[in-house]
Amino acid sequence: CEFETSTIQCEQAVHSSLLGDDSDYSVDVEPLPLNQEQLDASVQISYYALTNIDVVAGTAELFLGIEMTWNDERLRWDPNEFGGCFDTLFRASLDLELTNIWVP
């Protein structure tokens, strides 16, 4: 954030505007671009470690990282309207109880 607004105030204002009670944002609605039938999304899986192998059961436990990228136009704002706030973080999870935004 720039100007006289703190980073916390900037981010709270963006979140309230985009995801607050007065917004029409829904995590249940896919953010399809105008005049398109599908959303482009990418997934990157990073392997970190093999944590367990059970030969008898034929199972393995892995420690992986998953990064998903997509564009949700509903989460766009004008930084000049929010004290110069150019970016913020949103909680994203495949668990609907834990996510703030739509996730593929």
Image (spheres, rainbow, N blue to C red):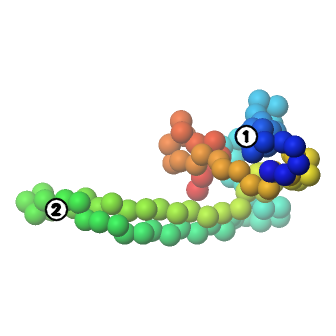
> Which of the two residues, 75 or 86, is positioned nearer the viewer here?
86
Question: Which residue has dot 2 on it?
Answer: 53
> Which of the two residues, 87 or 33, is positioned nearer the viewer here?
87
What residue is shown at x 83% (from left), y 61% (from top)?
34
Label 2 to label 1: alpha-carbon separation: 45 Å
Amino acid type of disc 2? Ile
What x and y, as percent, mark residue 59? 19, 60
Looking at the image, residue 11 sits to the left or right of residue 64; the answer is right
What residue is shown at x 84% (from left), y 52% (from top)?
2
- Can the viewer see residue 15 in this picture? no
Q: Quadrant of the C terminus?
A: bottom right
Looking at the image, residue 57 sits to the left or right of residue 6; the answer is left
What x and y, as percent, mark residue 45? 45, 68
Q: Are marks 2 and 1 in contact (CB under 8 Å)?
A: no
> Which of the two residues, 49 or 6, is positioned nearer the viewer here?
6
Q: Quadrant of residue 22?
A: top right
Q: Quadrant of residue 40?
A: bottom right
Looking at the image, residue 15 sits to the left or right of residue 49; the answer is right
| 37, above or below 82, in the image | below
Amino acid type of disc 1? Ile
| 104, above or below 69, in the image | above
Q: Quadrant of residue 14?
A: top right
What residue is shown at x 10% (from left), y 63% (from top)?
55
Q: Point out which mark residue 30 bears.
A: none
- Can the viewer see residue 31 in this picture? yes
Element under label 2? strand
Question: Which residue has dot 1 on it?
Answer: 8
What x and y, as percent, mark residue 24? 80, 38
> Which of the two residues, 19 or 56, is positioned nearer the viewer here?
19
Element under label 1? helix
Q: Earlier in the sequence, mark 2 or mark 1?
A: 1
Q: How many marks?
A: 2
